[in-house]
Image (cartoon, coloured by chain):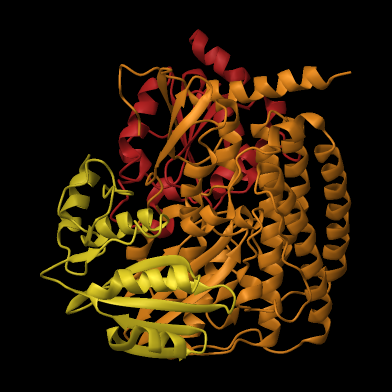
Amino acid sequence: MGWKEKILRRSLWVYHLGTGACNNCDIEILDVLTPRHDAERFGIKLVGSVRHADVLLVTGVITRKCLPRVLRVYEQMPEPRVVVAIGACPMEGCVFKGSYNQAGPLDKIVPVSLYIPGCPPKPEAIIAGVAKLMETLK
Amino acid sequence: MARKTVIPIGPFHPLQEEPEHFTLTVEGERVVDVDMELGYNHRGIEKLAEAKSWQQITFLVARICGICSTSHPIAYCNAVEDLCKVEIPERAKYIRTIVGELERIHSHLLWLGLAGHFLGYNTVWMWAWKWREPVLDIFEALTGNRNHYDMLLPGGVRRDIDEKNIPWIKKEMDEIKKKLDMITKAVLDDPVILSRLKGVGVLPPEEAKNYGAVGPTVRASGVKIDVRKDDPYAAYDKVDWDVITCENGDLLDKVVVRILETFESIKIMEKCLDALKEVKGEIITPIREFPPGEGIGHHEAPRGETFHYVKSDGGAGPIRHKVRAPTYVNLPTCKVTAPGCQIADAVIILAAIDPCYCCTERVGIVRDKKKEWLTQQDLVKLSWEKTERLRSKYAR
Amino acid sequence: MKELKEKLGDKLINLYEHTPKRIYVEIKREDLKDTVNYLFNERDMRLATASGVDGRREMEILYHFSEDKTGKVFSLRVKIPKDDLKVDSITPLIKGAEFIEREIHEMLGIDFVGHPNLKPLLLAEDWPEGIYPLRRDEKGIKNLKDKNWEK
């Protein structure tokens, strides 16, 4: 195990990237951080820049206008990169499947480590998903 | 002449959850111009709607936006019912009103929290979002989901409200009222917050009309428009309530309007819940024929009027479906409110219209080496620093 | 209603009342600016939005004006022939129409004469020119999608 993985095990800093979502997943992510769910007790923290982040949370269908920005944000992220697709949209498009402005599912654009399905997933599901992610990083 | 600096905000930055891009041009500390670029969230819903059936679109429009996920269906159903000239059952009207008002409560609380966050008052954020949770619990009990309620169909609603739930909902509403009362006193008595909000970002009523702005944004400027009152639908003409307006049109008034509206929404809800005990019967009139023609429906979403237009040729789905969300007309008002203010105030001014970009469609990065760069983080830091300065000034 | 009929006179092509609160008014393309001026400034209505519709024979733009005092919605219909997609811009009269016209321009390819800033609003920067997603006979979208999916 490298030292980077060792550090990763303790607390995950996440960066949130909305790429054409309906906002609901984004709000549920923020919800996870507020008092009822309080994910900070697990060391999960939302950071302001992707350069500080261990995990990239992606919500929403990838729109054409967002596509170059998604790639750019992904490249700015330090290694090891963990990408989490939240909600049905980045997986296959949800109700927006087949739209002219959808640039494709997220895993065709960047490698994805974890999918949390749902429209939107409940905060409990997001916490459970991230906990599972921590398991796999061990 | 002072040097002009261009500050790009977005499209991806930590605070507003959605991608959008603002370009602020500043001279020293003052903002002189603001420009915006949309389209990061454009998902082509209007085109998708043309390939779906009338019933399916209700679920599609619910996913235009996660915060107003019942406003768009209400407006859409109003449009379809206008096209077919059907009247929905009495009980369905009350249920629609209840869901619509619950959504307003949760949306305004959400905005209050975010506004607190932008001002550097994270306590307000945490409080408001904590008290928003019971509202989401009520949603879960009534509709089966915390967000994206999917309660409506053209012709009525999909689920009935169980009478067992009513006393519990009322109890929760009383709790929210108490807490909102507390937060109002705590927040609005704070001299720091007052000086951050008072007289900042004023929207004059003439400009509001010029831009066609709607909702709390213009009601704070004293323009009394509210679709619920002007063109009543659902049960809004059956219960007694008031349209809230303020006069100055500054940020403080926008906060006050939203807080008072929340109380008003609780009032409407309680009356509708009482009425549910009397009004029994069907909750949906199935619509089987969709005649050729046009229909227009609107609804007062938490952010303002949502406008839907459908055109039918008598087939299984519309041949044109136009959606206009409130932020679409409210956003350009920033061009009036932001210039002249300090950079530190820009964040809260841009947030004051309660922007919802995914609504706006369904609707850049400035690369000029000559120009100086500041990031959104710096900008929020500036905003927080100003609060700190004021805090130490007012500290006794 | 009556006032509207008198005021418009021979400019009016068709007036149809779907329900008492939903009124559709059809006028000629040339008279758009005058009529908008009358509705917006004299009758004090609010421009809710405008919808561009691709009809079979011609394009249509519906300007939805909302009269908040009475709750009525007046929809001003203008028909534009497909071989000459041009109409006067109303942005000089109503500032709020800027975004609306820009959107119709990029979705349907209708040219707004006199618009101060007619650049794309929503679509990506690398969106190919000449593809208008909301047109009925648009063939370009399909190829576009396949190409992008492969990436």
- Give the position of the C terminus of chain A as an image quadrant: top right
Q: Nearer the viewer, residue B338 or A46?
A: B338
Residue at the (16%, 49%) spot, across then down: C129
Number of disc labels = 0
Q: Which residue is the extreme one toward the top?
A: A3
In the visual, does B262 lie left or right of B334? right
Q: Position of residue B58 (x, y in %)?
A: 49, 70
In the picture, one chain is red; tell me its letter. Answer: A
In the picture, one chain is yellow; tell me its letter. Answer: C
Q: Position of residue A29 (x, y in %)?
A: 60, 40
Q: Nearer the viewer, residue A29 or C50?
A: C50
Depicted B311 relative to depicted A127: above or below = below
Q: Position of residue B274 (x, y in %)?
A: 84, 77
In the visual, does B268 lie left or right of B306? right
Residue at the (36%, 79%) spot, across then down: B311
Residue B60 figure quarter: bottom left
Depicted B225 relative to depicted C129: above or below = below
Q: Can residue A124 be seen by looking at this rendering?
A: no
Q: Position of residue B32 (x, y in %)?
A: 46, 31
Q: Nearer the viewer, residue B214 or C135?
A: B214
Give chain B's shade: orange
Residue B115 figure quarter: top right
Residue at the (30%, 46%) spot, across then down: A103
Depicted B102 relative to depicted B297: above or below = above
Q: Which residue is the extreme one toward the left?
A: C83
In the visual, does B4 lie left or right of C143? right
Q: Can residue B339 be seen by looking at this rendering?
A: yes
